[in-house]
Image (cartoon, rainbow, N blue to C red):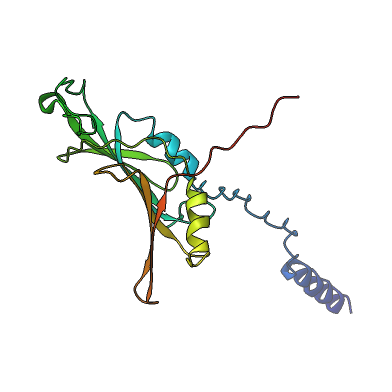
């Protein structure tokens, strides 16, 4: 009987040794930190384009591509291009008749083509094109040009290519507004006079 008891105790001791305890519970893995989403790029607006273009010396040609009726460049395709003339002076020939184009000093003149992208980043290249016509700061805003185009039948939700054309050969400065979408068979073109009345500021009380 003593032998059986000893064997039983030995077996129980062996069972105790073989029994493995469960591993301690692990704390849950914390989620990765949230990375803030960067804000969308700010679309450059037509007033900013006009201000930048007329800060350059002697702007000659201005083209605003894929701009909407709010005056904002399209985030995918919008850009603006300016041809500016850089010169130390113009010929002041007293014999030049009134209305005749000024003569650039060709040996002191070069042109520079500047492009701004949708967020206003600027790049430029030298250009071979010399122009005697010079743009003046427009009287109409791009939004006003759009309003006239919509009144003339332009689709209000479209994107337009708008050019400011300098006065030349008896024609005053004006805008050329165009919408072209070949797959949808949409073609719209309108010349808009740059003759908007000035906006009167409210008097200071």
Q: Residue at x 49, y 67 (%)?
A: 155
Q: Residue at x 41, y 53 (%)?
A: 192
Q: Report which quarter residue 7 is drawn in.
A: bottom right
The residue closer to the viewer here, 133 or 124, is 133
Q: Residue at x 47, y 39 (%)?
A: 48
* 104, above or below 170, in the image: above
Residue at the far left in the pictured view = 107
Image location of residue 145, percent across then percent down:
47, 52
Q: Is residue 44 visible?
A: no
* 62, above or below 112, in the image: below
Residue at the far right in the pictured view = 1
Image location of residue 60, percent across then percent down:
28, 38
Q: Is residue 19 visible?
A: yes
Image location of residue 40, percent across then percent down:
54, 50
Q: Is 10 situated left or right of 156 in this image?
A: right
The residue closer to the viewer here, 183 or 76, is 183
The residue closer to the viewer here, 106 or 193, is 193
């Amino acid at each position: 009987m003593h032998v059986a008891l000893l064997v039983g105790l030995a077996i129980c001791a062996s069972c105790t040794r073989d029994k493995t305890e469960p591993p301690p519970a692990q704390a849950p893995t914390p989620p990765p930190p949230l990375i803030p989403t960067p804000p969308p790029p700010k679309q450059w607006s037509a007033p900013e384009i006009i201000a930048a273009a007329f800060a350059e010396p002697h702007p000659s040609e201005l083209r605003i591509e894929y701009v909407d009726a709010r005056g904002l460049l399209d985030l995918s395709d919008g850009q603006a291009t300016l041809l500016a003339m850089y010169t130390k002076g113009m010929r002041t020939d007293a014999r030049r008749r009134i209305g005749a184009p000024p003569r650039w000093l060709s040996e002191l003149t070069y042109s520079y083509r500047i492009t701004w992208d949708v967020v206003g980043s600027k790049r430029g290249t030298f250009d071979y094109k010399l122009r005697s016509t010079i743009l003046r700061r427009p009287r109409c805003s791009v939004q006003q040009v759009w309003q006239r185009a919509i009144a003339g039948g332009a689709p209000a939700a479209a994107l337009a290519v708008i050019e400011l054309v300098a006065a030349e050969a008896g024609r005053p400065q004006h805008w050329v507004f165009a919408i072209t979408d070949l797959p949808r068979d949409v073609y719209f073109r309108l010349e808009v006079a740059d003759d908007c009345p000035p906006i009167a500021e409210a008097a200071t009380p």
